[in-house]
Amino acid sequence: MAECIGFIGLGIMGSGMARNLVEKGHEVVVWNRTGAKMGALVDAGAAAGDSPADVARRCPIVMICVSDTADVDAVLTSDDGVLEGISAGSLIVDHSTISPAATVRLSNEVAQRGGAWVDAPVSGGSEGAVRGTLSIMAGGADEDIDRARPYMEAFGTTITHVGPVGAGQRVKIVNQILVVVTQLAVSEALLFAEASGLDLNATLDAVKGGAAGSWMLANRGPQMIERDWRPGFTIDLQQKDLRLALQAADAIGVPIPGTALVFQMYRALQNEGLGDEGNHALVKALEKMSGVEVGA
């Protein structure tokens, strides 16, 4: 039996995810801190909530997709927050990328009120959110993920149950380590190709289907060649995720030097005011070092 879905957070990812829920016929109540962002979803058929608590009162399943740990905390625990609106049987599905430790703490607060929690961070960029092709890594109890799955299928094509609450966030850290270190490799490779006088598009065609192929190469490589820095995911948001990765790795004593290097390179770009560009603008840090511009 279909349930009303609350969706909180209509940013670069959440807006596309919520729209897919609406377009696939689900009853959706949305809320966003900047109210103007609700207009397009309401025009598409969603209802507007008055507050996170109002959304939680109206919808037994509430999905959250906001920027950072502090934002999820605020959505849950502030005055008129989700915790004020949930009841026994409520299910919170958090699609944000946040601290695994905070995830467990917040899930316990929800459980104390009779609700359940699924941490389900996503990967695939804003393109995947719009197209409904996101990869979702979900942590939680079997029955809670089974309950959420039909709705997550509105915007995700790969939904993997990776373990208990908190495991979804840890797998997302794995994802982000792979993303940024791969982006460094793509940046170095295209810089070398440019400096060598190669045809960049032909080079990309030659390598992307072989052992060196990757999502980042196939999707961000063409943007880099065209010097199109529109974000599927911004440097500022990527840095937030890398802080989570570095903190989590430090807590368990695991070295991740490649990730740390990329963090410092992104920091240099942030200091130049480039934090709102796509994370594939990492190549600009290498361009500064070399005096070579990819696709220039």
Image (cartoon, helix red, strand yellow):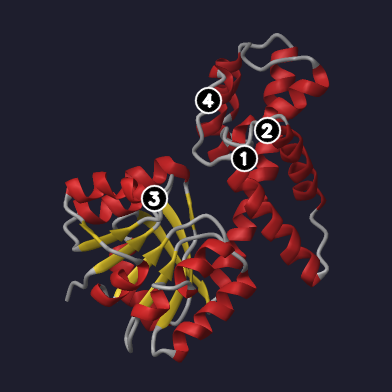
Callout in the foreground (3, 1): 3
Disc ID at residue 76: none
Q: Nearer the viewer, residue 120 or 35?
A: 35
Residue annotated with mark 2: 282
Residue annotated with mark 4: 223
Q: Name the residue type under label 4.
A: Gln
The residue sitting at the front extreme is 79
Residue annotated with mark 3: 34
Disc ID at residue 235: 1
Q: Which badge, 3 or 2, comes first in the chain's sequence?
A: 3
Callout in the foreground (1, 4): 1
Callout in the foreground (2, 1): 1
Q: Do the numbered discs 2 and 1 sit on residues whose CB atoms are within 8 Å?
A: yes
Q: Residue at x 29, y 59 (%)?
A: 30
Q: Do the numbered discs 4 and 3 sit on residues whose CB atoms are within 8 Å?
A: no
**Residue 253 sits above or below residue 196 on the image:** below
Disc 3 crowd, CA 10 A, few/some/many (<14, 14-19, 20+): few
